[in-house]
Image (cartoon, helix red, strand yellow):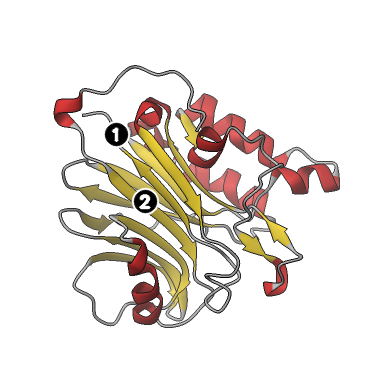
Amino acid sequence: MHVPPCSPIDSTKEHRIRLVTWNCCRGTFDSKWQRLLGLQPDLAVLQECATPTATASSTAWFGSNPKQGIAVVAQPPFHVSAEPAREGSRSMFAARVKGPVSFTVVAVWAQLEPTYSEALRRGLTVYRDVLLAGPSILIGDLNSSAAWDDRHGRNDHRELDVALHEEFGLVSAYHMATGEPAGLESRPTHFWRWHEAGPFHLDYCYLPERWCAGLKSVTVGTFEAWAGASDHRPVVVDVTPPG
């Protein structure tokens, strides 16, 4: 695993957390959450899930369509509470997480507003103060890829990466862990029309750069293991934030 050099963590205050993002491709919240529980997340963000009906976990749900929204779910000893949705973005929502490590989550499911890249830029403006207040993570289905930049002669995703780093101090956990360049990811998170022949990397977890010394691993679900559950694959991040 390639991790940039950072200041060492105070091991007396360590608490490893597991972050998961998964576009579950519709369905009831309970069925999708039960599927995801096998990954043992401390905090999970699910896109395209229905409104929760009943759960013992701490959950914040966002959206205007009760059959398709974003859920942010925390497992004990963590607790999550929703921040009020803000005008100007239908693609990002904020929630506060409290526990042994406390931070803010900006959960993403990029919509066509009117393009995915415009939706992401607008969302960063709307939630700029939240991200700058820190510590914050940005996590979810960005519907964005440097490979798409290369294919269409654009620079949208790379500009987003630069903005997240330079303006907010956030870096992609996957790329930190693997050392792979954006656009050349070996582990896709989305399969176009559910086909293995249509792989893309569209789902991300951006962490505060100061957390990088505590990044333990990043894994992506395989095509086979999740083939019947969604056209996306979960991204699992294990990290020990600084105390």
Q: Which residue is mark 2?
A: 19
* Residue type of the residue flagged with mark 2: Leu
The front one of 127 and 149 is: 149
The front one of 240 and 140 is: 240
Image check: 15 left or right of 6? left
Quadrant of the snapshot with the C terminus: top left
Image check: 48 left or right of 15? right
Tag 1 secondary structure: loop
**Residue shown at 24% from the left, 80% from the top:** 54
Image position of 80 with respect to 1: above or below: below
Image position of 86 with respect to 216: above or below: below
Image check: 138 left or right of 149? left
Q: Position of residue 77 (x, y in %)?
A: 15, 54
* Residue type of the residue flagged with mark 1: Pro
The front one of 176 and 58 is: 176
**Residue shown at 34% from the left, 76% from the top:** 34
Q: Position of residue 111 (x, y in %)?
A: 60, 61
Which quarter of the picture shows residue 81? Answer: bottom left
Q: Position of residue 216 (x, y in %)?
A: 38, 38
**Residue shown at 56% from the left, 62% from the top:** 222
Distance (Cα) linking label 2 and label 1: 12 Å
Image check: 95 left or right of 138? left
Q: Earlier in the sequence, mark 2 or mark 1?
A: 2
Q: Which residue is mark 1?
A: 241
